[in-house]
Amino acid sequence: PKEITTLVTFFGATGDLAKRKLFPSVYNLYKKGFLQEHFAIIGTSRQEMTTEEFQTFVSDSIKEFMQEDADADFIRHFDYEKADITVAADYAPLKAKIEKLDQEFALNGNRIFYMSIAPRFFGTVAKYLKSEELLSTNGEFNRLMIEKPFGVSFETAEKLQNELSDAFSEDQVYRIDHYLGKEMVQNIATLRFGNPIFNNAWNKDYIDNIQVTLSETLGVEDRAGYYDTAGALRDMIQNHTMQVVGWLAMDEPTEWTDTAIREAKNKAFNALKIYTPEEVAENFVRGQYGPDAANTQNGYLQEKDVPADSQNNTYVAGKLEFATDRWNGVPFYIRSGKRLAAKTTRIDVVFKQDANIFNNTQPLEKNVLSIIVDPEGKIEYSIIAKDTTPEFKTRPITLEWKVSADDKAQTPEPYERMIHDTMDGNGSNFADWNGVAVAWKFVDAIQSAWDATHQEFPNYVSGSMGPVAADELLARDGHKWVYEG
Ligand code: NAD
Protein backbone atom coordinates (compact mmCIF):
# COMPACT_ATOMS: atom_id res chain seq x y z
CA PRO A 1 0.00 0.00 0.00
CA LYS A 2 0.92 3.62 -0.52
CA GLU A 3 2.10 5.18 2.73
CA ILE A 4 -0.11 7.96 4.10
CA THR A 5 1.57 10.91 5.81
CA THR A 6 -0.60 12.42 8.51
CA LEU A 7 -1.05 13.50 12.06
CA VAL A 8 -4.31 12.55 13.77
CA THR A 9 -5.49 14.28 16.92
CA PHE A 10 -8.12 12.30 18.77
CA PHE A 11 -10.34 14.40 21.03
CA GLY A 12 -11.92 12.16 23.66
CA ALA A 13 -8.92 9.81 23.46
CA THR A 14 -9.57 8.25 26.87
CA GLY A 15 -13.19 7.42 26.01
CA ASP A 16 -14.95 4.19 25.28
CA LEU A 17 -15.09 4.56 21.48
CA ALA A 18 -11.39 5.42 21.19
CA LYS A 19 -10.43 2.36 23.21
CA ARG A 20 -12.81 -0.12 21.57
CA LYS A 21 -12.68 0.97 17.95
CA LEU A 22 -10.37 3.85 17.07
CA PHE A 23 -6.97 2.66 18.32
CA PRO A 24 -7.47 -0.91 17.05
CA SER A 25 -8.42 0.56 13.65
CA VAL A 26 -5.28 2.70 13.53
CA TYR A 27 -3.23 -0.37 14.45
CA ASN A 28 -4.72 -2.32 11.56
CA LEU A 29 -3.80 0.51 9.17
CA TYR A 30 -0.26 0.33 10.51
CA LYS A 31 -0.08 -3.46 10.12
CA LYS A 32 -1.32 -3.18 6.54
CA GLY A 33 1.37 -0.62 5.72
CA PHE A 34 -0.82 2.46 5.18
CA LEU A 35 0.92 3.99 8.18
CA GLN A 36 4.68 3.46 8.28
CA GLU A 37 7.13 6.14 9.42
CA HIS A 38 5.36 9.40 8.71
CA PHE A 39 2.44 9.38 11.06
CA ALA A 40 1.72 10.55 14.59
CA ILE A 41 -1.26 10.24 16.86
CA ILE A 42 -2.05 12.72 19.61
CA GLY A 43 -4.55 11.77 22.24
CA THR A 44 -6.24 14.52 24.19
CA SER A 45 -8.96 14.68 26.83
CA ARG A 46 -9.48 16.46 30.08
CA GLN A 47 -7.82 13.67 32.05
CA GLU A 48 -4.35 14.11 33.52
CA MET A 49 -2.07 11.54 31.92
CA THR A 50 1.55 11.28 30.86
CA THR A 51 2.49 10.22 27.34
CA GLU A 52 3.85 6.94 28.78
CA GLU A 53 0.53 6.28 30.52
CA PHE A 54 -1.35 7.04 27.33
CA GLN A 55 0.89 4.70 25.34
CA THR A 56 0.09 1.98 27.88
CA PHE A 57 -3.62 2.81 27.53
CA VAL A 58 -3.35 2.34 23.75
CA SER A 59 -1.35 -0.92 24.12
CA ASP A 60 -3.95 -2.20 26.58
CA SER A 61 -6.78 -1.36 24.18
CA ILE A 62 -5.06 -3.34 21.41
CA LYS A 63 -4.44 -6.23 23.79
CA GLU A 64 -8.05 -6.22 24.95
CA PHE A 65 -9.81 -5.75 21.63
CA MET A 66 -7.39 -7.40 19.20
CA GLN A 67 -5.73 -9.94 21.49
CA GLU A 68 -2.33 -8.73 20.32
CA ASP A 69 0.75 -7.08 21.71
CA ALA A 70 1.14 -3.84 19.80
CA ASP A 71 4.48 -3.27 18.10
CA ALA A 72 6.72 -0.94 20.13
CA ASP A 73 7.52 0.94 16.93
CA PHE A 74 3.80 1.66 16.48
CA ILE A 75 3.26 2.86 20.05
CA ARG A 76 6.19 5.26 19.79
CA HIS A 77 4.10 7.39 17.39
CA PHE A 78 1.53 8.13 20.14
CA ASP A 79 1.63 11.20 22.34
CA TYR A 80 -0.73 12.77 24.86
CA GLU A 81 -1.73 16.29 25.83
CA LYS A 82 -4.33 17.15 28.41
CA ALA A 83 -6.77 19.88 27.39
CA ASP A 84 -10.20 21.05 28.46
CA ILE A 85 -11.82 21.59 25.07
CA THR A 86 -14.06 24.35 26.41
CA VAL A 87 -11.07 26.48 27.42
CA ALA A 88 -9.36 28.46 24.64
CA ALA A 89 -6.04 28.67 26.51
CA ASP A 90 -5.80 24.86 26.65
CA TYR A 91 -5.36 24.70 22.88
CA ALA A 92 -1.92 26.39 22.99
CA PRO A 93 -0.02 23.40 24.45
CA LEU A 94 -1.90 21.13 22.05
CA LYS A 95 -0.82 23.31 19.14
CA ALA A 96 2.79 23.20 20.35
CA LYS A 97 2.64 19.42 20.53
CA ILE A 98 1.14 19.14 17.06
CA GLU A 99 3.91 21.30 15.64
CA LYS A 100 6.59 19.33 17.45
CA LEU A 101 5.37 15.99 16.15
CA ASP A 102 4.88 17.45 12.68
CA GLN A 103 8.64 18.18 12.66
CA GLU A 104 9.72 14.98 14.38
CA PHE A 105 7.87 12.62 11.99
CA ALA A 106 8.03 14.87 8.90
CA LEU A 107 4.25 15.10 8.49
CA ASN A 108 4.15 17.95 5.97
CA GLY A 109 1.41 19.77 7.88
CA ASN A 110 -1.22 17.10 7.04
CA ARG A 111 -3.76 17.09 9.84
CA ILE A 112 -6.87 15.18 10.84
CA PHE A 113 -8.93 16.04 13.91
CA TYR A 114 -11.22 13.31 15.18
CA MET A 115 -14.02 14.35 17.52
CA SER A 116 -14.78 11.36 19.71
CA ILE A 117 -16.54 13.57 22.22
CA ALA A 118 -20.08 14.44 23.27
CA PRO A 119 -21.94 16.14 20.38
CA ARG A 120 -22.46 19.35 22.33
CA PHE A 121 -18.70 19.98 21.99
CA PHE A 122 -18.44 19.53 18.19
CA GLY A 123 -19.04 23.20 17.39
CA THR A 124 -16.82 24.47 20.21
CA VAL A 125 -13.84 22.38 19.14
CA ALA A 126 -14.19 23.40 15.49
CA LYS A 127 -14.28 27.04 16.53
CA TYR A 128 -11.15 26.81 18.70
CA LEU A 129 -9.24 24.73 16.14
CA LYS A 130 -9.53 27.72 13.88
CA SER A 131 -9.25 30.63 16.31
CA GLU A 132 -6.31 29.09 18.21
CA GLU A 133 -4.64 28.28 14.89
CA LEU A 134 -4.30 24.52 15.13
CA LEU A 135 -5.02 24.13 11.43
CA SER A 136 -1.95 23.98 9.27
CA THR A 137 -1.46 26.53 6.55
CA ASN A 138 1.36 24.78 4.74
CA GLY A 139 0.07 21.20 4.47
CA GLU A 140 -1.92 19.29 1.90
CA PHE A 141 -4.93 18.95 4.16
CA ASN A 142 -6.84 19.72 7.36
CA ARG A 143 -9.74 17.34 7.86
CA LEU A 144 -12.37 16.92 10.52
CA MET A 145 -13.93 13.57 11.45
CA ILE A 146 -17.12 14.00 13.35
CA GLU A 147 -19.09 11.48 15.37
CA LYS A 148 -22.83 11.14 15.56
CA PRO A 149 -25.42 12.39 16.20
CA PHE A 150 -25.33 15.37 13.86
CA GLY A 151 -27.98 17.46 15.63
CA VAL A 152 -31.29 16.22 16.99
CA SER A 153 -33.49 18.14 14.51
CA PHE A 154 -32.99 20.20 11.37
CA GLU A 155 -32.67 23.35 13.43
CA THR A 156 -29.95 22.01 15.75
CA ALA A 157 -28.15 20.32 12.85
CA GLU A 158 -28.12 23.58 10.90
CA LYS A 159 -26.71 25.44 13.88
CA LEU A 160 -23.94 22.85 14.18
CA GLN A 161 -23.32 23.00 10.46
CA ASN A 162 -22.92 26.78 10.65
CA GLU A 163 -20.41 26.40 13.47
CA LEU A 164 -18.41 23.81 11.53
CA SER A 165 -18.47 25.72 8.29
CA ASP A 166 -16.95 28.79 9.96
CA ALA A 167 -13.78 26.72 10.33
CA PHE A 168 -13.98 23.94 7.71
CA SER A 169 -15.26 23.72 4.16
CA GLU A 170 -17.62 20.88 3.22
CA ASP A 171 -14.87 18.85 1.54
CA GLN A 172 -12.87 18.90 4.79
CA VAL A 173 -15.69 17.48 6.91
CA TYR A 174 -16.09 13.70 7.24
CA ARG A 175 -19.39 12.92 8.99
CA ILE A 176 -19.32 9.40 10.27
CA ASP A 177 -22.20 7.03 9.69
CA HIS A 178 -20.76 3.61 10.38
CA TYR A 179 -23.43 1.94 8.23
CA LEU A 180 -21.70 3.54 5.25
CA GLY A 181 -18.53 1.74 6.34
CA LYS A 182 -20.16 -1.70 6.17
CA GLU A 183 -18.93 -4.02 3.45
CA MET A 184 -22.34 -4.97 2.11
CA VAL A 185 -23.60 -1.40 2.11
CA GLN A 186 -20.60 -0.50 -0.04
CA ASN A 187 -21.52 -3.48 -2.21
CA ILE A 188 -24.86 -1.88 -3.21
CA ALA A 189 -23.19 0.41 -5.74
CA THR A 190 -21.05 -2.42 -7.11
CA LEU A 191 -24.08 -4.63 -7.66
CA ARG A 192 -26.06 -1.84 -9.25
CA PHE A 193 -23.47 -0.21 -11.48
CA GLY A 194 -21.34 -3.29 -12.19
CA ASN A 195 -24.11 -5.50 -13.54
CA PRO A 196 -26.07 -4.42 -16.62
CA ILE A 197 -28.99 -6.66 -15.66
CA PHE A 198 -29.50 -4.66 -12.47
CA ASN A 199 -28.29 -1.29 -13.69
CA ASN A 200 -30.69 -1.27 -16.63
CA ALA A 201 -33.61 -2.46 -14.55
CA TRP A 202 -33.05 -0.09 -11.62
CA ASN A 203 -36.08 2.11 -12.23
CA LYS A 204 -39.87 2.34 -12.15
CA ASP A 205 -40.28 0.22 -15.30
CA TYR A 206 -38.83 -2.85 -13.62
CA ILE A 207 -38.86 -2.29 -9.88
CA ASP A 208 -42.07 -2.79 -7.95
CA ASN A 209 -40.87 -1.66 -4.54
CA ILE A 210 -37.74 -1.51 -2.39
CA GLN A 211 -37.61 -2.52 1.27
CA VAL A 212 -34.96 -1.61 3.84
CA THR A 213 -35.01 -3.33 7.23
CA LEU A 214 -32.76 -2.52 10.21
CA SER A 215 -34.05 -4.69 13.03
CA GLU A 216 -32.69 -5.31 16.49
CA THR A 217 -33.59 -7.96 19.06
CA LEU A 218 -32.39 -6.01 22.08
CA GLY A 219 -34.60 -3.59 23.99
CA VAL A 220 -33.56 -0.22 25.34
CA GLU A 221 -31.23 -1.86 27.94
CA ASP A 222 -29.76 0.87 30.17
CA ARG A 223 -29.85 3.69 27.59
CA ALA A 224 -33.36 5.04 28.29
CA GLY A 225 -31.99 8.46 29.31
CA TYR A 226 -30.86 9.00 25.73
CA TYR A 227 -33.21 6.72 23.83
CA ASP A 228 -36.44 8.05 25.26
CA THR A 229 -35.60 11.46 23.78
CA ALA A 230 -34.56 10.03 20.40
CA GLY A 231 -36.62 6.96 19.51
CA ALA A 232 -36.08 4.74 16.49
CA LEU A 233 -36.93 7.63 14.17
CA ARG A 234 -33.96 9.76 15.17
CA ASP A 235 -31.68 6.94 16.36
CA MET A 236 -31.91 4.71 13.25
CA ILE A 237 -34.04 6.23 10.47
CA GLN A 238 -32.70 9.79 10.12
CA ASN A 239 -29.11 8.61 9.79
CA HIS A 240 -28.39 4.95 8.94
CA THR A 241 -31.57 4.06 7.07
CA MET A 242 -31.57 7.24 5.01
CA GLN A 243 -27.91 6.82 4.11
CA VAL A 244 -28.55 3.25 2.89
CA VAL A 245 -31.54 4.53 0.91
CA GLY A 246 -29.24 7.10 -0.71
CA TRP A 247 -27.17 4.33 -2.36
CA LEU A 248 -30.38 2.66 -3.59
CA ALA A 249 -32.19 5.73 -4.89
CA MET A 250 -29.34 7.64 -6.56
CA ASP A 251 -28.68 7.78 -10.28
CA GLU A 252 -25.45 6.40 -11.66
CA PRO A 253 -22.76 8.98 -10.84
CA THR A 254 -21.04 10.60 -13.82
CA GLU A 255 -17.70 9.25 -12.54
CA TRP A 256 -16.41 7.22 -9.62
CA THR A 257 -15.36 10.09 -7.34
CA ASP A 258 -16.72 11.28 -4.03
CA THR A 259 -17.92 14.55 -5.54
CA ALA A 260 -19.89 12.84 -8.31
CA ILE A 261 -21.29 10.23 -5.91
CA ARG A 262 -22.52 12.91 -3.52
CA GLU A 263 -24.00 14.88 -6.37
CA ALA A 264 -25.96 11.86 -7.59
CA LYS A 265 -27.18 11.02 -4.09
CA ASN A 266 -28.21 14.60 -3.46
CA LYS A 267 -30.29 14.68 -6.60
CA ALA A 268 -32.30 11.80 -5.12
CA PHE A 269 -32.41 13.24 -1.59
CA ASN A 270 -33.64 16.57 -2.94
CA ALA A 271 -36.53 14.77 -4.67
CA LEU A 272 -37.69 13.05 -1.47
CA LYS A 273 -41.26 13.99 -0.67
CA ILE A 274 -41.56 15.68 2.75
CA TYR A 275 -44.93 14.77 4.27
CA THR A 276 -47.76 16.87 5.62
CA PRO A 277 -49.28 15.67 8.94
CA GLU A 278 -52.07 13.89 6.99
CA GLU A 279 -49.51 12.16 4.79
CA VAL A 280 -47.52 11.13 7.87
CA ALA A 281 -50.63 9.41 9.22
CA GLU A 282 -51.07 7.60 5.90
CA ASN A 283 -47.45 6.67 5.27
CA PHE A 284 -45.81 6.16 8.63
CA VAL A 285 -46.38 3.78 11.53
CA ARG A 286 -44.87 4.08 14.99
CA GLY A 287 -44.62 1.33 17.54
CA GLN A 288 -43.60 0.67 21.09
CA TYR A 289 -42.82 -2.81 22.37
CA GLY A 290 -44.82 -4.56 25.04
CA PRO A 291 -43.73 -7.70 26.92
CA ASP A 292 -43.00 -10.85 24.93
CA ALA A 293 -45.64 -13.55 24.41
CA ALA A 294 -44.44 -15.56 27.42
CA ASN A 295 -44.30 -12.39 29.53
CA THR A 296 -40.66 -12.92 30.49
CA GLN A 297 -39.39 -9.59 29.08
CA ASN A 298 -40.44 -6.12 30.15
CA GLY A 299 -42.42 -3.89 27.85
CA TYR A 300 -40.78 -0.54 27.06
CA LEU A 301 -42.88 1.30 29.63
CA GLN A 302 -41.65 -1.02 32.38
CA GLU A 303 -37.98 -0.54 31.48
CA LYS A 304 -35.56 1.27 33.80
CA ASP A 305 -35.69 5.10 33.51
CA VAL A 306 -38.56 5.13 31.00
CA PRO A 307 -41.35 7.57 31.99
CA ALA A 308 -44.59 5.65 32.63
CA ASP A 309 -46.46 7.71 30.02
CA SER A 310 -43.72 7.72 27.37
CA GLN A 311 -44.95 8.15 23.79
CA ASN A 312 -41.52 7.27 22.45
CA ASN A 313 -41.25 5.12 19.33
CA THR A 314 -39.16 1.95 19.56
CA TYR A 315 -40.32 0.98 16.08
CA VAL A 316 -40.86 2.90 12.86
CA ALA A 317 -42.09 1.75 9.48
CA GLY A 318 -42.87 4.00 6.57
CA LYS A 319 -43.03 4.68 2.91
CA LEU A 320 -40.69 7.04 1.06
CA GLU A 321 -41.43 8.56 -2.32
CA PHE A 322 -38.93 10.11 -4.69
CA ALA A 323 -40.30 12.49 -7.31
CA THR A 324 -37.80 11.63 -10.04
CA ASP A 325 -38.19 10.14 -13.51
CA ARG A 326 -36.50 7.04 -12.22
CA TRP A 327 -38.78 6.48 -9.26
CA ASN A 328 -42.19 8.07 -9.76
CA GLY A 329 -44.72 5.70 -8.18
CA VAL A 330 -42.18 3.26 -6.68
CA PRO A 331 -42.46 3.01 -2.91
CA PHE A 332 -39.37 2.63 -0.74
CA TYR A 333 -40.52 0.92 2.46
CA ILE A 334 -38.27 1.29 5.47
CA ARG A 335 -38.49 -0.09 8.99
CA SER A 336 -36.40 -0.26 12.11
CA GLY A 337 -37.10 -1.23 15.66
CA LYS A 338 -36.06 -2.81 18.91
CA ARG A 339 -37.13 -6.18 20.36
CA LEU A 340 -37.95 -7.60 16.97
CA ALA A 341 -37.81 -11.26 15.96
CA ALA A 342 -34.31 -11.07 14.48
CA LYS A 343 -31.28 -8.84 14.36
CA THR A 344 -30.62 -8.03 10.74
CA THR A 345 -29.89 -5.29 8.26
CA ARG A 346 -31.15 -6.07 4.78
CA ILE A 347 -32.41 -4.66 1.54
CA ASP A 348 -35.03 -6.41 -0.59
CA VAL A 349 -35.56 -5.17 -4.11
CA VAL A 350 -38.81 -6.52 -5.52
CA PHE A 351 -39.03 -6.52 -9.32
CA LYS A 352 -42.19 -6.23 -11.35
CA GLN A 353 -43.46 -9.50 -12.83
CA ASP A 354 -45.51 -9.53 -16.01
CA ALA A 355 -44.27 -12.75 -17.70
CA ASN A 356 -47.25 -14.86 -18.78
CA ILE A 357 -46.21 -17.04 -21.73
CA PHE A 358 -46.50 -20.30 -19.73
CA ASN A 359 -50.30 -20.45 -19.67
CA ASN A 360 -49.99 -19.91 -15.94
CA THR A 361 -53.22 -19.50 -14.09
CA GLN A 362 -51.56 -17.69 -11.19
CA PRO A 363 -49.21 -14.75 -11.64
CA LEU A 364 -45.58 -15.82 -11.41
CA GLU A 365 -43.66 -15.00 -8.24
CA LYS A 366 -41.74 -11.75 -8.39
CA ASN A 367 -37.96 -11.70 -8.72
CA VAL A 368 -36.37 -10.42 -5.54
CA LEU A 369 -32.80 -9.26 -5.05
CA SER A 370 -31.87 -9.35 -1.37
CA ILE A 371 -28.71 -7.73 -0.06
CA ILE A 372 -28.13 -8.93 3.47
CA VAL A 373 -25.74 -6.64 5.33
CA ASP A 374 -25.88 -8.11 8.85
CA PRO A 375 -25.39 -10.39 10.65
CA GLU A 376 -23.75 -12.14 7.70
CA GLY A 377 -23.02 -10.66 4.29
CA LYS A 378 -25.14 -12.39 1.68
CA ILE A 379 -26.74 -11.79 -1.70
CA GLU A 380 -29.83 -13.73 -2.72
CA TYR A 381 -31.56 -13.48 -6.06
CA SER A 382 -34.87 -15.19 -6.30
CA ILE A 383 -35.95 -15.96 -9.90
CA ILE A 384 -38.31 -18.18 -11.87
CA ALA A 385 -37.07 -21.56 -13.14
CA LYS A 386 -38.66 -24.80 -14.35
CA ASP A 387 -40.01 -27.39 -12.00
CA THR A 388 -39.05 -31.06 -12.58
CA THR A 389 -42.57 -32.46 -12.92
CA PRO A 390 -43.57 -34.05 -16.30
CA GLU A 391 -46.18 -31.41 -17.00
CA PHE A 392 -44.64 -27.99 -17.56
CA LYS A 393 -44.52 -26.03 -14.32
CA THR A 394 -42.44 -23.22 -12.91
CA ARG A 395 -41.05 -22.57 -9.47
CA PRO A 396 -39.00 -19.83 -7.82
CA ILE A 397 -35.37 -20.72 -7.08
CA THR A 398 -32.81 -18.68 -5.19
CA LEU A 399 -29.25 -17.97 -6.30
CA GLU A 400 -27.17 -17.29 -3.25
CA TRP A 401 -23.73 -15.92 -2.49
CA LYS A 402 -22.29 -15.59 0.98
CA VAL A 403 -19.25 -13.76 2.27
CA SER A 404 -16.67 -16.50 2.94
CA ALA A 405 -14.73 -16.86 6.17
CA ASP A 406 -11.61 -15.70 4.28
CA ASP A 407 -13.42 -12.66 2.88
CA LYS A 408 -14.72 -11.88 6.30
CA ALA A 409 -11.26 -12.06 7.86
CA GLN A 410 -10.00 -9.63 5.15
CA THR A 411 -12.87 -7.16 5.55
CA PRO A 412 -11.91 -4.01 7.42
CA GLU A 413 -14.16 -2.90 10.26
CA PRO A 414 -16.21 0.21 9.42
CA TYR A 415 -14.08 2.42 11.66
CA GLU A 416 -10.85 1.23 10.05
CA ARG A 417 -12.26 1.99 6.62
CA MET A 418 -13.57 5.41 7.61
CA ILE A 419 -10.26 6.45 9.17
CA HIS A 420 -8.41 5.16 6.12
CA ASP A 421 -10.73 6.96 3.69
CA THR A 422 -10.35 10.23 5.59
CA MET A 423 -6.57 9.91 5.52
CA ASP A 424 -6.89 9.20 1.81
CA GLY A 425 -9.26 12.15 1.21
CA ASN A 426 -12.10 9.99 -0.08
CA GLY A 427 -15.50 11.22 1.12
CA SER A 428 -17.60 8.68 -0.81
CA ASN A 429 -18.71 6.82 2.30
CA PHE A 430 -19.58 9.74 4.55
CA ALA A 431 -22.78 11.67 5.07
CA ASP A 432 -22.74 15.10 3.50
CA TRP A 433 -24.58 18.16 4.74
CA ASN A 434 -27.27 18.28 2.08
CA GLY A 435 -28.26 14.64 2.69
CA VAL A 436 -28.26 15.11 6.45
CA ALA A 437 -30.37 18.27 6.14
CA VAL A 438 -33.00 16.60 3.94
CA ALA A 439 -33.15 13.60 6.27
CA TRP A 440 -33.78 15.90 9.22
CA LYS A 441 -36.51 17.83 7.43
CA PHE A 442 -38.16 14.56 6.49
CA VAL A 443 -37.91 13.13 10.00
CA ASP A 444 -38.90 16.39 11.75
CA ALA A 445 -42.17 16.43 9.77
CA ILE A 446 -42.95 12.93 11.04
CA GLN A 447 -41.93 13.65 14.61
CA SER A 448 -44.01 16.82 14.83
CA ALA A 449 -47.09 15.06 13.45
CA TRP A 450 -46.62 12.34 16.08
CA ASP A 451 -46.00 14.86 18.87
CA ALA A 452 -49.39 16.38 18.07
CA THR A 453 -51.32 13.10 18.37
CA HIS A 454 -51.65 10.52 21.11
CA GLN A 455 -51.14 6.84 20.35
CA GLU A 456 -52.05 3.82 22.48
CA PHE A 457 -48.95 1.81 23.41
CA PRO A 458 -47.71 -0.87 23.52
CA ASN A 459 -48.74 -2.00 20.05
CA TYR A 460 -46.38 -4.86 19.33
CA VAL A 461 -45.21 -7.93 21.18
CA SER A 462 -41.49 -8.29 21.91
CA GLY A 463 -40.09 -10.94 19.57
CA SER A 464 -42.51 -10.14 16.73
CA MET A 465 -41.74 -8.14 13.57
CA GLY A 466 -43.59 -5.03 14.79
CA PRO A 467 -47.12 -3.63 14.77
CA VAL A 468 -49.82 -5.07 12.51
CA ALA A 469 -50.23 -1.58 11.06
CA ALA A 470 -46.80 -1.96 9.41
CA ASP A 471 -48.06 -4.98 7.46
CA GLU A 472 -51.25 -3.11 6.57
CA LEU A 473 -49.20 -0.21 5.25
CA LEU A 474 -47.81 -2.47 2.50
CA ALA A 475 -51.00 -4.48 2.05
CA ARG A 476 -52.84 -1.29 1.07
CA ASP A 477 -50.47 -0.96 -1.90
CA GLY A 478 -50.81 -4.68 -2.73
CA HIS A 479 -47.34 -5.46 -1.32
CA LYS A 480 -45.89 -7.37 1.60
CA TRP A 481 -42.66 -7.44 3.54
CA VAL A 482 -40.28 -9.93 1.93
CA TYR A 483 -38.52 -10.60 5.22
CA GLU A 484 -40.81 -11.97 7.90
CA GLY A 485 -38.31 -12.57 10.71
P1 NAD B 1 -16.99 8.69 26.50
O1 NAD B 1 -17.88 9.39 27.47
O2 NAD B 1 -16.53 7.32 26.81
O3 NAD B 1 -15.69 9.58 26.27
C1 NAD B 1 -15.74 10.97 26.16
C2 NAD B 1 -14.33 11.57 26.09
O4 NAD B 1 -14.46 12.99 26.06
C3 NAD B 1 -13.41 11.24 27.27
O5 NAD B 1 -12.10 11.03 26.76
C4 NAD B 1 -13.45 12.53 28.10
O6 NAD B 1 -12.26 12.73 28.86
C5 NAD B 1 -13.57 13.56 27.02
N1 NAD B 1 -14.10 14.83 27.52
C6 NAD B 1 -15.31 15.07 28.10
N2 NAD B 1 -15.42 16.37 28.44
C7 NAD B 1 -14.27 16.99 28.04
C8 NAD B 1 -13.77 18.32 28.11
N3 NAD B 1 -14.48 19.34 28.66
N4 NAD B 1 -12.53 18.57 27.61
C9 NAD B 1 -11.81 17.57 27.05
N5 NAD B 1 -12.22 16.31 26.97
C10 NAD B 1 -13.44 16.00 27.46
O7 NAD B 1 -17.73 8.77 25.08
P2 NAD B 1 -17.64 7.72 23.86
O8 NAD B 1 -18.55 6.60 24.13
O9 NAD B 1 -16.21 7.41 23.61
O10 NAD B 1 -18.28 8.55 22.65
C11 NAD B 1 -17.61 9.60 21.99
C12 NAD B 1 -18.41 10.08 20.80
O11 NAD B 1 -18.63 9.00 19.90
C13 NAD B 1 -19.79 10.63 21.11
O12 NAD B 1 -20.07 11.66 20.18
C14 NAD B 1 -20.73 9.47 20.83
O13 NAD B 1 -22.00 9.94 20.45
C15 NAD B 1 -20.02 8.83 19.66
N6 NAD B 1 -20.27 7.41 19.48
C16 NAD B 1 -19.92 6.49 20.42
C17 NAD B 1 -20.12 5.14 20.19
C18 NAD B 1 -19.72 4.11 21.20
O14 NAD B 1 -19.84 2.93 20.87
N7 NAD B 1 -19.25 4.45 22.37
C19 NAD B 1 -20.69 4.72 19.01
C20 NAD B 1 -21.02 5.67 18.05
C21 NAD B 1 -20.80 6.99 18.31
Image (cartoon, helix red, strand yellow):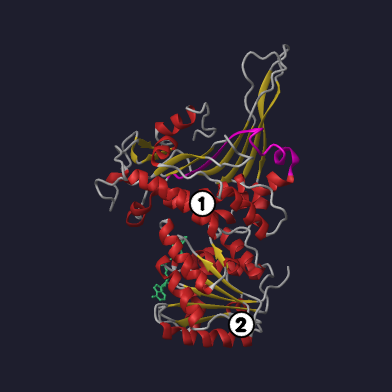
Residue 125 percent coordinates (x, y): 46, 74
Q: Amino acid at mark 1?
A: His
Above or below 45: residue 246 = above
Residue found at the very far left of the displayed protein: 308
Q: CA distance from mark 2 to mark 1?
A: 35 Å
* Picture quadrant where residue 309 is located: top left
Left or right of 326, for residue 154: left
Looking at the image, which is closer to me, 167 or 297? 167
Q: Position of residue 271 (x, y in %)?
A: 56, 46
In the displayed structure image, the side of residue 201 where residue 434 appears, left or right: left
Q: Which residues are magenta?
A: 195-217
Left or right, 208 with reference to 388: left
Amino acid at circle 2: Thr
Up the image or down, 89 lies above or below 351; here it is below
Q: Is residue 268 above or below residue 421?
A: above
Which residue shows up at 38% across the image and 53% down it?
A: 230
- Name which of mark 2 and mark 1 comes first in the sequence: 2
Nearest the eye: 200 or 298: 200
Label 1 belongs to which residue? 240
Residue at image location 43% in from the left, 81% down from the top:
83
Question: Where is residue 415 drawn, in percent x and y?
Answer: 56, 62
Residue that badge 2 annotates:
137
Residue at 49% x, 35% y is 485
